């Protein structure tokens, strides 16, 4: 069985093309349900440290060394050093988006806010610019509200904000995926599913979990959401607790990954950063330009890398056309997509 190198050297975006929402699934341009594994960058805020990883070399390493199909640029908004105070945060995001386009991977442009309803006009200005620059490309995914807090109303506060920002994006970009957060740090997807956004297509909902803190009861909420017909995207998950501390909860992570594969949900691990905290993928002081050795990974980073690099084999696209196998994969029937 001979396959040309050119065919199998396809990038993820060449392979999967434009993403859209079909029922409670995210599908690629051939209509196959896809689940992508990737990493989230840390807050972009100036002076917080994580911004050093917003560079093309780090994105290349994520693709080349870890095999990510998606990377998330988490642009801080209202917090110190964020976009509202320092507009240069936008250039950091743009550098990651351009690198992702170069690498042929998907990229999430995340408005990393806990109070986005207070900055709606700024969000509209920002996402209008992003849509004008990148909305014609299949790579780009908009995430318009990272994590609304607990106690904020979905129907009265988050949904109206989301609809206004979505309308602004859709005026320019009619089709790219838009991901919306939900109250309680993007856990109340069940609540959102009872009053979903219906005025626009290709809307998905963020589901966030930290494996030591969140277990079966959050998966039950996710099931309610799926059963109500909305699509989910785990734009952020941690292997540790919700405070980004503690230790890696291996068993819980395993249960979550089975769930995500079963329901074809994509996921980005928090976070590609070297801050001294358990959720960081890298140990303090590493070069920000990639090529990290095993000894430069934390326990969380090592687990995230192992999940990401094996994800295609663990969780292949469903009902993909029979066109190719991945070079380097063991030849088995499941590898014949
Ligand atoms: Mg578009």
Image: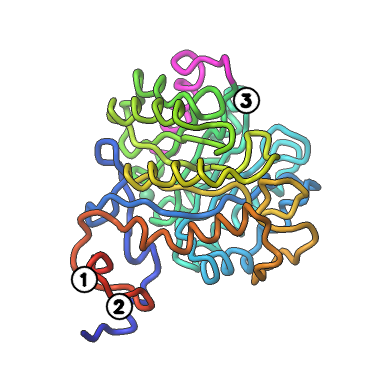
Left or right: 229 in relation to 293: left
Task: Give the number of marks.
Answer: 3
Q: Which residue is mark 3?
A: 115
Task: Find the distance from the CA under tag 3 to the CA under tag 2.
Answer: 45 Å
Above or below, 285 against 244 in this view is below
Q: Which mark is residue 323?
A: 1
Q: Which badge, 3 or 2, comes first in the chain's sequence?
A: 2
Above or below, 130 against 4 in this view is above
Q: Considering depth in this image, is 316 or 25 the residue closer to the camera?
A: 316
Residue at x 64%, y 72% (from the top left corner) = 291
Secondary structure under tag 3 reads: loop
Q: Considering depth in this image, is 316 or 185 the residue closer to the camera?
A: 316
User: In this picture, which residue range is highlighted in magenta?
Assistant: 150-170
* Residue 235 on image: x %, y %: 50, 43
Q: Which mark is residue 141?
A: none
Q: Residues within 10 Å of mark 3 (few under 14, many from 20)?
A: some
- Say whether marks 1 and 2 touch (CB < 8 Å): yes
Is 157 contained in the magenta span? Answer: yes
Quadrant where the N terminus is found in the figure:
bottom left
């Amino acid at each position: 069985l001979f396959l040309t190198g050119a065919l199998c050297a396809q990038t993820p975006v060449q392979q999967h093309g434009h993403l859209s929402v079909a029922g409670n699934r995210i599908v690629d341009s051939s209509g196959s349900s896809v689940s992508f594994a990737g990493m989230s960058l840390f807050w972009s805020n100036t002076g917080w440290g994580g911004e050093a990883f917003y560079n093309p070399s780090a994105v290349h390493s994520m693709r080349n060394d870890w095999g990510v199909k998606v990377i998330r640029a988490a642009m801080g908004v209202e917090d110190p050093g964020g976009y509202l105070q320092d507009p240069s945060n936008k250039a950091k995001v743009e550098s990651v988006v351009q690198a992702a386009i170069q690498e042929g991977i998907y990229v999430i442009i995340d408005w990393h806010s806990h109070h986005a309803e207070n900055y709606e006009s700024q969000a509209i200005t920002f996402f209008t610019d992003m849509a004008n620059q990148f909305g014609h490309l299949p790579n780009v995914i908009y995430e318009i509200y990272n994590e609304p807090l607990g106690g904020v109303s979905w129907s009265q506060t988050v949904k109206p904000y989301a609809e206004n920002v979505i309308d602004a994006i859709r005026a320019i970009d009619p089709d790219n995926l838009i991901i919306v957060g939900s109250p309680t740090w993007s856990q109340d997807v069940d609540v959102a599913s009872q009053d979903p956004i219906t005025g626009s297509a290709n809307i998905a909902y963020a589901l966030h979990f930290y494996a030591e803190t969140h277990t079966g009861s959050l998966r039950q909420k996710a099931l309610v959401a799926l059963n109500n017909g909305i699509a989910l995207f785990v734009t952020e998950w941690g292997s540790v607790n919700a405070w980004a501390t503690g230790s890696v909860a291996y068993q819980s992570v395993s249960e979550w990954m089975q769930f995500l594969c079963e329901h074809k949900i994509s996921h980005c691990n928090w976070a590609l950063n070297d801050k001294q905290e358990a959720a960081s993928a890298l140990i303090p002081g590493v070069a920000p330009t990639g090529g990290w050795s095993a000894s430069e990974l934390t326990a969380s980073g090592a687990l995230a890398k192992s999940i990401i690099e094996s994800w295609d084999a663990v969780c292949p696209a469903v009902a993909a056309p029979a066109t190719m196998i991945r070079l380097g994969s063991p030849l088995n029937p499941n590898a014949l997509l």
